[in-house]
Amino acid sequence: MWETFFGLKKTPFSDRPDGKLLFASAAWQQVNERLEFLAQHHGVGLLTGEVGAGKSTAARVFTATLNPNLYKILYIHFSSGTALDLLRQIALTLDLEPAHYRGDLVRQIAEAVVRLNQSKKQHPLLIVDEAHLLPHAALEQLPLLLNFDMDSARYLSLLLIGQPLLRRTLTLQLHEALRQRVAVHYHLEGLTREELDAYLAQQLKAAGVTAALFTDTARQTIYQATKGIPRKVNKLAVAALRLAAQRQAESVDEAVALEATKEVLL
Ligand SMILES: Nc1ncnc2c1ncn2[C@@H]1O[C@H](COP(=O)(O)OP(=O)(O)OP(=O)(O)O)[C@@H](O)[C@H]1O
Ligand SMILES: [Mg+2]
């Protein structure tokens, strides 16, 4: 086992790290500030970023900090389907028996959302993850849910999460109503070069090793291959450590890092 070879007590670079192991990069803090603003002021937020940049993780970790008496998180991971399917999914997350027709569904959702705010004093935050996959017709339904009442109170907050394509989609005239309501937007990029060093060290330390297991040039290679995207960094770091252990090398050097980049599909 490569972990024991390096004296690691746990496997570092996990796919689903616990809260303590999340790395608070500058971008991560920017995302959090915006999500906090959204939770405080209500409205629409947009979180975009490359695949594996940490968008879903950021939303998951942030929503876990919200007081469940005050916020109801409606999380939708929409991968395919029609506009009607999206509304049905939203109705289901509100524990409703979805109505048959679109107009009824919208009314039903609206009523449930107002009820949550007024009777339970809970503000619903609808999170639509992978929103770049929403067909235009589905995306067009969302503004209907944001201003269904005559008063100007914001009863529902919405966080759209998706790949960079989502930003472009929202620039279309068709989605102006939604675009105009976006109060906060952040585009999550990978870790910087310095942050990558700190992240590698943090992960190794959490697994019980303080020795530098990656040489300077190996870290540079990892940065170039991953652009600091956490999912890619994790994958490549593990592959490189495994290769180094196989060769009984005490650390990952540039040659091992390069070879690992060829082995993993980034
Ligand atoms: N700040 C962080 N610290 C440590 N690990 C992180 C951090 N952010 C993301 N990760 C890790 O990177 C991986 C990818 O994160 P996540 O799934 O949130 O990305 P995503 O942007 O939602 O990707 P996709 O576009 O595929 O949905 C996960 O394994 C996650 O644990
Ligand atoms: Mg995701």
Image: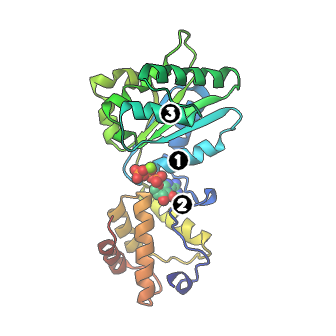
Disc 3 from disc 1: Cα separation: 21 Å
Residue 71: image quadrant is top right
Residue 110 appears left or right of 164: right
| Proximity of marks 3 and 1: CB atoms separated by less than 8 Å | no
Q: Residues within 10 Å of mark 1 (few under 14, many from 20)?
A: some
**Amino acid at pointer 2:** Arg
Q: Is residue 2 above or below residue 204?
A: below
Evaluate if marks 2 and 3 touch, with contact meaning CB atoms under 8 Å apart.
no
| Residue 177 in view in this figure | yes
What amino acid type is highlighted by mark number 3? Answer: Ile
Q: Residue at x 42, y 55 (%)?
A: 192
Amino acid marked by disc 1: Ala
- Mark 2 and mark 3 lie on one chain; the one further toward the N terminus is 2
Q: Residue at x 31, y 78 (%)?
A: 259
- Secondary structure of the residue carrying tag 1 is helix
Residue under pointer 3: 90
CA gap, disc 2 and disc 1? 12 Å
Q: Which mark is residue 16?
A: 2
Residue located beneath label 1 in the image:
58
Q: Is residue 109 rendered to the left or right of residue 131?
A: right
Say whether residue 26 is visible: no
Looking at the picture, does residue 174 appear above or below residue 57?
A: above
**Label 2: element kind:** loop
Return the x and y of residue 168 as percentages of the image width and height: 29, 35
Q: Position of residue 115 (x, y in %)?
A: 64, 22
Label 2 lies in ligand 1 vicinity (Cβ under 8 Å): yes
- Label 1 residue near ligand 1, CB within 8 Å: yes
